[in-house]
Amino acid sequence: MKKSSSIYVITPQTMLVEPRPYGTKIYSWVIEEDTSFLLPVKPTILIKQSCLAYGSTYEGRRDATKLVSSLATKTPILIEGMYLFPTLSPANRECIWVSLNHIDHSVSNGMKHTDLLFKNGVRRTLALSNRSFQSQIKKTMMFQLKITEGFKTGDIGTSISDPPMKASESSSPYDLQHT
């Protein structure tokens, strides 16, 4: 667990963040590799705080995912090497955030439940179909592949429809060639 100015921050040890009713409020149940604990903040707020702690907004990370992968709904995000994805819309109070990095496998547990096994042996039953869960895993893996391949080829954030400009074609006010 990493704390930054008394707030919890997602780390490589974070495996899952799920909503937990606490009286009339929703708190976050955080599962890490070797511990689990309750935090007095909603999961989406926790994700947003972690993004900020690492120098970007949640919206910026989500927009980057959309740019790189063309995913529009339930978009995964990258936080410090951790690929996290929501099980539902992040606006849904029952949304759970799962770290792709820690998943071993999942199996169907009826029509509307999935048993998730993490690499460290921790098991969790999620209230969504395994088909939906596998779809989120595939989206996140596609995003991870595009990021990885983009770094290898230098094509992160470029669009096929917008060919790269030559330096002489720049219209930037910071263009030093026209001074």
Image (spheres, rainbow, N blue to C red):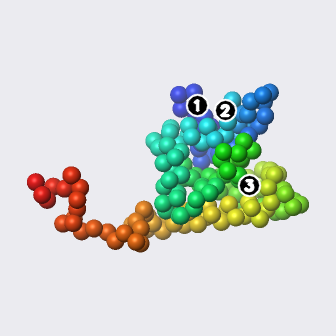
Q: Which of marks 2 and 1 is in front?
A: 2
Instruction: For marks 1 and 3, give the CA distance.
Output: 25 Å
Q: Name the residue under label 2.
A: 41
Q: Which of marks 1 and 3 is in front?
A: 1
Q: Which of marks 2 and 3 is in front?
A: 2
Q: Residue at x 74, y 61 (%)?
A: 132
> Compared to 168, does 40 lie above or below?
above
Quick check: can you spot residue 33? no
Q: Determine contact: label 2, label 1, CB under 8 Å.
A: yes
Q: Where is residue 58 in the image (x, y as percent from the top left)?
A: 53, 45
Q: Residue at x 80, y 60 (%)?
A: 129
Give 100 or 64, whichever is nearer the viewer.
64
Q: Residue at x 81, y 52 (%)?
A: 127
Q: Name the residue under label 1.
A: 7
Q: Quadrant of residue 177?
A: bottom left
Q: Where is residue 93 in the image (x, y as percent from the top left)?
A: 72, 42
> Compared to 123, does 159 lie above or below?
below
Helix, strand or loop for disc 2: loop
> In the rendered view of the protein, which quadrant contains the N terminus?
top right
Q: In which quarter of the image is residue 24?
A: top right
> In the rendered view of the protein, which quadrant contains the C terminus?
bottom left
The numbered mark, 1 or 3, whose residue comes first in the sequence reads 1
Q: Which residue is drawn at 68% across and 60% down?
A: 136
Q: Position of residue 87 (x, y in %)?
A: 71, 53
Q: Mark 3 points at which residue?
A: 118
Q: Which amino acid does label 3 sit on?
A: Phe
Task: Give left or right: position of 66 versus 125.
Answer: left
Q: How crowded is mark 3: few (under 14 residues within 10 Å), some or many (20 or more)?
A: many
Q: What residue type is labelled 1?
A: Ile
Q: Residues within 10 Å of mark 2 (few under 14, many from 20)?
A: some
